[in-house]
Amino acid sequence: MSIEKIVEQALQDGYLTPAMEAEVGRICNTASELSIEEYMALDRLMGALLTGEVVVLPRKQFINVMEELVLSEAIARVAEIEATSDKTLDVGDIAAYALNRLPPLYATTEEGANYQRARAKEQLQDLITQQVNNAIARYLDRPDFYPERQALGKSSGNELLSQVSSLLQTYAGQFEQKPKNLR
């Protein structure tokens, strides 16, 4: 989506979502130079934000306490393994695997987060440890058949188009329609 369309949408809706804000930031960071229209749209957005015509929605109004508990456990276990072996582990992969197998613990206040932490440490710590250990075992046991894979947010649009183009060139020949016999 272009800056102009994002600004138009924000003015129409009266708010700027975190996704809209991130997209404007991405465009500004990747463009070598913005057009006059883009600068004018950003100026309109700034004015609307200053007058309150458009409000920015908060990035996060809640937290998943389970994420911090799993990350803490994963970081501690990964540090132990990396200190005693020549293996390098990806904490993000390990945490994601474990989180997908654990219940979320959302909170909207600090008191709620403290309650969730205490409850999780009392009732779920063994399960958290077990799932992190399972995730590490799976990570260490996985074959290295996709060394070219990239973490989320690390590839640009041009790289994605190049990858899709390469994929199509590789596999398109296998799917060409054969001419039908005319009788």
Image (cartoon, helix red, strand yellow):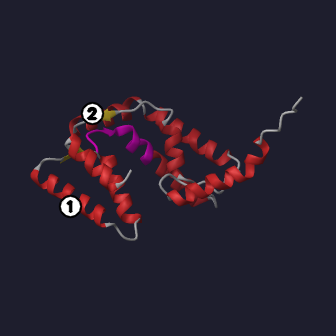
Question: Within the image, what quadrant is residue 163 found in?
Answer: bottom right
Q: Which residue is mark 2?
A: 115
Looking at the picture, tell me which residue is in the foreground, 163 or 115: 163
Task: Kindly identify the amino acid type of the residue bearing the numbered disc 1.
Answer: Asp
Range of magenta residues: 58-72
**Residue drawn at 19 percent across, 57 percent down:** 44
Mark 1 surroundings within 10 Å by alpha-carbon count, few (fewer than 14), some (14 through 19), many (20 or more): few
Helix, strand or loop status at disc 1: helix
Q: Position of residue 126 (x, y in %)?
A: 47, 33
**Residue drawn at 42 percent across, 48 percent down:** 72
Q: Position of residue 165 (x, y in %)?
A: 64, 54
Q: Which residue is mark 1?
A: 43
Would residue 131 be seen by someone viewing this image from the given angle?
Answer: yes
Looking at the picture, tell me which residue is in the foreground, 41 or 136: 41
Q: Quadrant of the C terminus?
A: top right
**Residue drawn at 63 percent across, 59 percent down:** 85
The answer to whether 37 is drawn above or below residue 119 in the figure is: below
The answer to whether 150 is drawn above or below residue 10 in the figure is: below
Q: CA distance from mark 1 to mark 2?
A: 44 Å
